[in-house]
Amino acid sequence: MKQSHVFRSGLLGLSFILLVVALYLIFIYVPTEKTMGIVQRIFYFHVPVAWVAFLAFFIVFLGSILYLWKRQSKWDVIASSSAEVGIVFTTLVLITGSIWAKPIWGVWWTWDARLTTSLVLWLIYVAYLIVRSYATEEQRGARFAAIVGIVGFIDVPIVALAITLWRTQHPGPVIFQGGLAPPMLLTLLVCLAAFTTLYCLLLIQRVSMKNDEGEIKRLKELCSWGCD
Amino acid sequence: MSFWRNVIAITWKDALSQMRTKELVSSVLVFTLLVIVIFNFAFGASQETMRLVAPGILWVTFAFAGVLSLNHSFILEKEEGCLEGLMVCPISREVIYVGKMLGSLLFMLIIEAIALPIFAFLFNLILSLQLVVITVLTTVGFVAVGTLFSALAVNTRAREMVLPILFLPIVVPIIICAVRASGLALSGEPWGSLSSWLQIIGAFDVIFLVVSFLIFAFVIEE
């Protein structure tokens, strides 16, 4: 118990430091991009957030398979916590993407391949949470959600493929030609590390919260059974 | 071999119960017709716009009709206690999946076989073999995922609500491909230009038939 607390505090400290460093790099260190200007700095936020969202859904996929296979509720707790964090990060991807799109493309939203894929992804995992909440009992909800978690993740590459093929029929906006300049790459990597650490922290926090909820529920049941 | 004999028994049971009542076929058909008519109002009736939006209308209609009929596929089983009966039968869960899937496929293909000519008639379009192939392939994808989710949705509280919420985002890729391929087919393009779309639909069908087959047993466990 004590050990996990120390670990969590360490993770909190680490992600705090990394995020502060990331902010410094984004707003002070890294040079402004030539064609897009100041707004391009949102890139260092947008890309890591998208990466974390994808990582989170991959964890949902793994957790779902392990839950169906082993039937230990800890896998379900991990999967559902990761799905919640993933939805938050996908929402952030959509929001930062829109903020970036407005000055560059002139519109908040365009049915660009990546944007559309993110939106479909968001819808699939919202369905994941809805199924769980509509189930009549907890275990059944966990099982149903696991099925959606597996099917949804397998669907993602097909969605991306279909939407890319659909959109590349029209000339699409080019985001980057050629590689990133070294300072930009460094900033991106630090931001990736910062957000990945933040994800781990959020996931662990949510898992322990869910475990506590389960424990309280169990104690309550025990208590009401004892009182009667 | 007994696998397929059991599968066909389940599919036959579904077909028989549909033929006896004819309730679902007629209501889904009327629904399909209504959706097409209402879209006609939504987009204005000029010949030009219709040619442009017809493939979209067709696939939105079929997706909705799919949700409607797939929802029913397991609700009937549940209400009459038939699902329990199937589950105590000495057959594997996979047999139930394939049987129900084929039943829904048959049902939807019948609906589409009637709706497609009506659609072509109303919008002045010419049906081609290409359109038939696209329809069959996409419908296989619909029922492959739909049967899995229908069995899942029927065991939740708001069961009619859950299926579309699950089903529609998952079938997005094949709806995109079907709309695109139908558009090309209706404007008389050769097979070659359709192939990349058909390939994605085919890949989707194969992947989700296998995945659903493998995990169906987890849906109807108790």
Image (spheres, coloured by chain):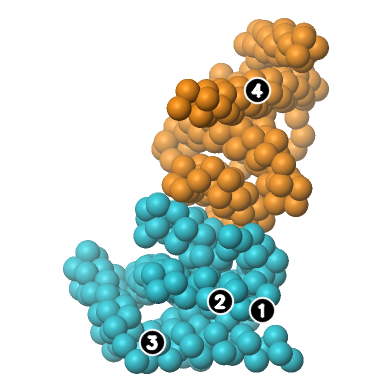
Chain colours: A orange, B cyan
Whichever of labels 3 and 2 marks the residue nearer the N terminus, that label is: 3
Q: CA distance from mark 4 to mark 3?
A: 50 Å
Say which quarter of the image contains residue B162. bottom left
Q: Are marks 1 and 4 in contact (CB under 8 Å)?
A: no
Q: CA distance from mark 3 to mark 2?
A: 18 Å
Q: CA distance from mark 1 to mark 3?
A: 23 Å
- The front one of B25 and B208 is B25
Q: Residue at x 50, y 72 (%)?
A: B83
Q: How many residues crowd around disc 2 within 10 Å: few (fewer than 14), some, or many (20 or more)?
A: some
Residue position marked by numbered label 3 in the rendering: B18
Q: Amino acid at mark 1?
A: Ile
Whichever of labels 1 and 3 marks the residue nearer the N terminus, that label is: 3
- The front one of B189 and A143 is A143
Q: Residue at x 65, y 22 (%)?
A: A208
Q: Amino acid at mark 3?
A: Gln
Residue position marked by numbered label 1 in the rendering: B91
Determine whether, in the image, residue A119 is placed left or right of residue B65. Answer: right
Residue position marked by numbered label 2 in the rendering: B86
Determine whether, in the image, residue A6 is placed left or right of residue A148. Answer: right
Front of the two marks 1 and 4? 1
Q: Which mark is residue A208?
A: 4
